[in-house]
Image (cartoon, rainbow, N blue to C red):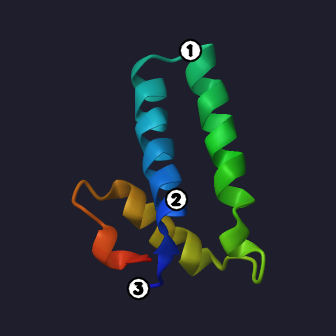
């Protein structure tokens, strides 16, 4: 598994939580805006500046967002 910075993994977890909230309460403007801001934060994170993410890297990052357990062992410090 690739190492991800803590803030990138945290943003992915927040994105997933916000997406779930929006699915439960559709039409909430503040949730849509938060989801948009988090998407931008994920896509343009400095971690991706040296190399654009491969599809496999996106899947690994999304997998971190699905995890309900502490993922600190999989993160780069």
Q: Earlier in the sequence, mark 2 or mark 1?
A: 2
Residue 42 sits in quarter: bottom right
Residue farthest along the left direction in this orientation? 69
Q: Residue at x 71, y 73 (%)?
A: 48
Q: Residue under label 1, please give it.
A: 28
Within 10 Å of the Cα at label 1, are there few (<14), some (14-19), or many (20+) other Cα atoms? few
Count the marks.
Answer: 3
Q: Position of residue 23 (x, y in %)?
A: 45, 27
Q: CA distance from mark 3 to mark 2?
A: 17 Å
Q: Secondary structure at mark 3?
A: loop
Q: Position of residue 20 (x, y in %)?
A: 41, 34
* Image depth: mark 3 or mark 2 in front: 2
Q: Earlier in the sequence, mark 3 or mark 1?
A: 3
Q: Residue at x 60, y 36 (%)?
A: 35
Q: CA distance from mark 2 to mark 1?
A: 25 Å
Q: Secondary structure at mark 1?
A: loop
76 shown above or below 64: below
Question: In which quadrant is the C terminus drawn?
Answer: bottom left
Q: Residue under label 2, please give it.
A: 7
Q: Which of 61 and 72 lies nearest the eye of the viewer?
A: 72
Residue 38 sits in quarter: top right
Q: Residue at x 30, y 67 (%)?
A: 71
Within 10 Å of the Cα at label 3, are there few (<14), some (14-19), or many (20+) other Cα atoms? few
Q: CA distance from mark 3 to mark 1?
A: 35 Å
Q: Position of residue 40 (x, y in %)?
A: 72, 48
Q: Residue under label 3, please give it.
A: 1
Question: In which quadrant is the N terminus drawn?
Answer: bottom left
Within 10 Å of the Cα at label 2, are there few (<14), some (14-19), or many (20+) other Cα atoms? some
Q: Residue at x 60, y 18 (%)?
A: 30
9 shown above or below 17: below
| Label 2 close to label 1 by CB (< 8 Å) | no
Q: Earlier in the sequence, mark 3 or mark 2?
A: 3
């Amino acid at each position: 598994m690739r190492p991800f910075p803590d803030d990138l993994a945290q943003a992915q977890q927040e994105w997933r939580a916000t997406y779930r909230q929006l699915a439960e309460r559709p039409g909430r403007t503040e949730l849509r805006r938060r989801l948009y801001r988090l998407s931008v934060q994920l896509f343009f994170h400095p971690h991706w500046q040296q190399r654009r993410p491969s599809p496999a890297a996106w899947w690994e990052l999304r997998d971190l967002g699905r995890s309900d357990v502490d993922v600190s062992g999989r993160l780069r410090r």
